[in-house]
Amino acid sequence: MKPGLTAKLFLAVLAACALVLLVNGVAARITFQRAFFGYLNDQGVERMQEVLPRLGAEYTTHGNWDFIRDNPSVWFALMRPERRASERRQAPPISDQTGAVPRFAVLDRDYCVLVGNPDAGRDSILRPIQADGRVVGWMAMVPFQRALAAGDARFFEAQVHAWWLIGIASVLVAALLAWLVSRTLLRQMRGLAAATHRLAAGDYATRIDASARDELGQLARDFNRLAQALEHNERARRDFMADISHELRTPLAVLRAELEALQDGIRPLTSASLAALHQQVGQLGKLVEDLYDLSLTDVGALAYRHAAIDLTMVLATTLDSMRMRFAAAHLALHEHIAPGPLMVNADERRLQQLFANLLENALRYTDAGGSVQVGCERRGAQVQMVIEDSAPGVAADKIDRLFERFYRTDASRNRGSGGSGLGLAICRNIVEAHHGTIVAEHAPLGGLRIVLHLPALEDR
């Protein structure tokens, strides 16, 4: 049976703590030994430097080493620290207090021990003894490590025993901390897993506590945003199904009523009755086309053939095709287009569809006798196009929802005017496919102002 996440996390944290303690203990032991023994040896070397001039002077006086050979009393007399009569009595040097003097020895030029520690030799710490400018012997000091090598077994065993006790206690503390940490983390992970299962089962109202300021807290906040997005999408899907069924039911009901009236002889088959049927069929066809275009733009399957085109030419062509309709609706059409070319990388056919939808929206929802203004100019690295119309306007709390599918604001912009409520949603998808932006604002003329930005091509 493979260990679970709790066991893995506990073992990982415990192993990390134990390894850190092991490395720290070994490093501390080695560092302490080197630093401590180095300090003691340095103190001994300083003491040697004080004695060397005396040994040189005594050798010069006697002419050889016979005066000190196997004569400990003379040796210890020379090792005694000098003290002037004016000085107060002081404690012995640190080197003497740490046992450096018994580790000293005097060697002749051939490194033979004359007096002092018999273990001294070539491998000891050596300093030359000079007399009349020549080396006449050596002062040696057995390193502290070697001096302890023979008698430190019990001390070493005691240290190892203490180290094991400290290590075991530290590992137990680390295990306790690892258990607490893993328990806390796993409790949050289990909560996140349970919420994920509920979300997968369709409970999009699921939310989890995201008050933590660590990575798990960020994960919880991301989860809540995901759940919120799924809840919004589910609500939008249901609204879409309700809207599309309503949009289809209305013209179908009219068609059924007209056909039944014709069948029952209530209404004669005339050009007027056929025109009414044709109008409803046309409305159904427009709705189906809009739904098809919207579905293609939503999934990115709408074909785009990008090329360098002059935006002013496409806009002028679209305006020319709709001038008569604006005149028939008693709407004044004003243009403020900068002299071209205004080059963009775009699909000309899709831009014509975009401009036609925007102008159709202004034509359909502007009261007779009003006006529509169309502007286009270069703004830095972008081309800006503005379409604004006169009354009626859109309420401030509804203007941000104009690009939602099937959304209509009020009776002034309603189904009776012939729109399916999909035109602006299609426009937004086309603009985003061209890496541009489109927003709706209040127009100074009293109606709606649509502002469109597309990336401009650099002038060549």
Image (tube, rainbow, N blue to C red):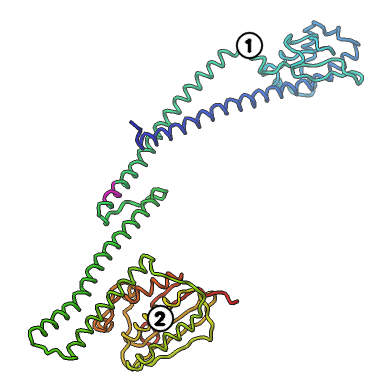
Dot 2 falls on a residue whose secondary structure is helix
- The mark found on residue 341 in the picture is none
Residue 18 vs residue 261, the one in the foreground: 261
Identify whether 4 is placed above or below 380. Answer: above
Q: Amino acid at mark 1?
A: Ala
Residue 234 vs residue 317, the one in the foreground: 317
Q: Tell me what residue is drawn at x 34 percent, y 90 percent.
A: 325
Give the quadrant of residue 80: top right
Q: CA distance from mark 1 to mark 2?
A: 99 Å
Q: Quick check: marks 1 and 2 in contact, CB under 8 Å?
A: no
- The mark found on residue 150 in the picture is 1
Query: For mark 2, what is the residue?
Result: 355
Which segment is the magenta one? 194-198
Q: Nearer the viewer, mark 1 or mark 2?
A: 2
Q: Tell me what residue is drawn at x 24 percent, y 65 percent.
A: 238
- Quadrant location of the N terminus in the rendered image: top left
Compared across the picture, whether 381 is left or right of 349 comes to right
Q: Position of residue 94 (x, y in %)?
A: 69, 22
Residue 61 vs residue 38, the one in the foreground: 38
- Quadrant location of the C terminus in the rendered image: bottom right
Callout 1 crowding tier (Cα within 10 Å): few <14, some 14–19, many ≥20: few
Confirm whether residue 408 shows in the render: no
